[in-house]
């Protein structure tokens, strides 16, 4: 599994489960909506710090962003 796609898929899934838009996640995380969009499409390679910031904004552990779960 491509880690960029895995992280992107998990961010998008968790964001939707929490009822958040990309704009709302942008406000919570401090990352731009364009960056989040690219990340969710597997086009970005986030740093460990970025993963931590997104996890904090989504109120999950960073490990949840890296875990391969069935769709």
Image: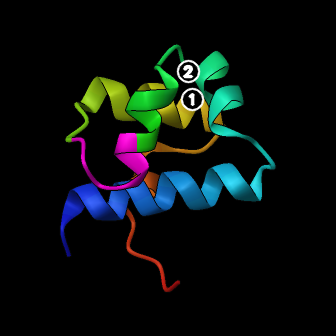
Residue at the spot 46% in from the left edge and 25% down from the top edge: 53
Q: Nearer the viewer, residue 32 or 45?
A: 32
Q: Dividing the picture into quarters, in which one does residue 39 lie?
A: top left
Which mark sits nearer the N-terminus, 1 or 2? Answer: 2
* Label 1: how many Cα within 10 Å (few below 14, some 14–19, many 20+): some
The front one of 7 and 34 is 34
Task: Please say if the residues under marks 1 and 2 sit with CB atoms less than 8 Å apart.
Answer: yes
**Range covered by the magenta-colored residues:** 38-44
User: Residue 71 location, x and y as percent?
Assistant: 53, 83
Q: Nearer the viewer, mark 1 or mark 2?
A: 2
Colouring: rainbow
Q: Quadrant of residue 28?
A: top right
Q: Position of residue 69 (x, y in %)?
A: 47, 78
Rendered location of residue 16, percent (x, y)? 70, 55
Residue drawn at (75%, 42%) of the image:
20
Q: Residue at x 44, y 63 (%)?
A: 9
Residue assigned mark 2 = 29
Snapshot quadrant of residue 52:
top left
Picture coordinates of residue 58, whole percent (x, y): 63, 38
Give the mark count: 2
Residue 26: which disc?
Answer: none
Q: Secondary structure at mark 2?
A: helix
Left or right: residue 66 compared with residue 70: left
Pick out the residue farthest to the bottom.
70
Mark 1 and mark 2: Cα distance apart in space: 8 Å
Residue that label 1 marks? 56
């Amino acid at each position: 599994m491509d880690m960029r796609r895995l992280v992107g898929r998990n961010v998008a899934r968790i964001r939707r489960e929490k009822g958040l838009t990309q704009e709302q996640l942008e406000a919570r995380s401090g990352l731009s909506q364009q960056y989040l969009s690219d990340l969710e499409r597997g086009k970005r390679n986030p740093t460990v710090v970025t993963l931590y910031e997104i996890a904090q904004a989504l109120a999950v552990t960073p490990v949840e962003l890296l875990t391969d779960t069935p769709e």
